[in-house]
Amino acid sequence: MSHTLLKRLAIGLATLIVLWLIAAWFRSDPDSGSGTFALPVVDSGLVDSIVIEKSAEQMTLRRGDGGWTVNGYSADSAAVSSFLALFGQEVPADLTAMNPSSHARLEVDEASGRSVLIFQEGDLSSELIVGKRGASFQNVYVRRPGQDRVYEVQANLSTHVDRALDDWRSKRVAFIDADSVGEVTIRRDGELMTIRRASDSTWTVNSAEADAAEVRRLLDLLGPLNAAGFPQPAQRDSVDFSDPDRELVIRDRAQQVLLEMVMDSTGAGFWVRKTGDSVVYRLDRFRANQLTPADSTLRAESAG
């Protein structure tokens, strides 16, 4: 083998080693954006508030003694936990842009970007600007504040930062153990129906024998009972519970009230409010009918 050929092989090998070292360095450096991106590390146990801002819109999640709230409403704690679980991960990423002129197009600029601010024990601990979705549904463009680099990361951030207020709010109306229930009172179409537990496995409806399986299906709806949504401000003004269309009262075996709520009929279902609670929920008509069935639905066949 000639000296010239050996020299060429040596140069080629050295070039490959340099390229490999450069690629390895990029993969190991989250800031390089070539391979991974390190989402901010947060201690979910210390996080006391999360702020998501876009233009004039702001979603503020706060942790309190009673759990999480969003803009003053009770929040879905599972949604908050799912969001916080994303942080601290190294996710696949590609460096997409390094020039501020690309920020508006990728929606990571001041006007269109969604700022995510996370506070731990009252202090701002992490901040990220989330842009539009990337080439695939799971991808999204992100930028660190004060930096020009934009990364396309494979992380389900958009699902969370795109949530509307009602999507963050807790839709839990009640959670009642069926075995704890001793009596159910339903007022529907001006008629009163009382379902009472006769034993652990038998029930009566207005003193007649009840279909225990149908009663159990009714009670199982309460563990948990989740709403379909909430009224919009204009709809909220038209809700009137002064003369409710339906009423539902659940008592335990000691006759203590577990749940009392009234229902106001609307085109697509019912507005619902629990006694002592100002929150108005929306139930679809099918679920409302399941919760407040007709007398004939619950009577055993032998009872006529």
Image (cartoon, grey):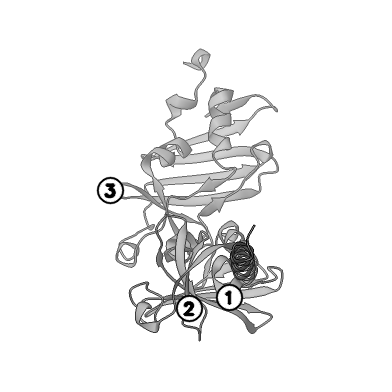
| Extreme-front residue of the structure | 2
Residue 139 x %, y %: 46, 59
Q: Earlier in the sequence, mark 2 or mark 1?
A: 1
In depth, the one of 297 and 42 nearer the eye is 42
Task: Report the amino acid beneath label 2.
Answer: Arg
Which label number is shown at residue 267?
A: 3
User: How many residues crowd mark 3 within 10 Å: few (<14), some (14–19), many (20+)?
Assistant: few
Kind of element beneath mark 3: loop
Residue at image coords 56%, 42%: 222
Residue at 46% x, 50% y is 227
Circle nearer the N terminus (1, 3): 1
Q: Quadrant of the N terminus?
A: bottom right
Residue depicted at 39% across the width and 58% down the height: 135
Tell me, yes or no, whether the two marked residues, 2 and 3, touch with CB atoms within 8 Å.
no
Identify the element where label 2 is drawn. Answer: loop
The residue that label 2 is drawn on is: 149
Q: Residues within 10 Å of mark 2 (few under 14, many from 20)?
A: many
Q: Which residue is mark 1?
A: 31
Q: Are marks 2 and 1 in contact (CB under 8 Å)?
A: yes
Q: Secondary structure at mark 1?
A: helix
Q: Position of residue 211 (x, y in %)?
A: 55, 22
Q: Mark 1: which amino acid?
A: Asp
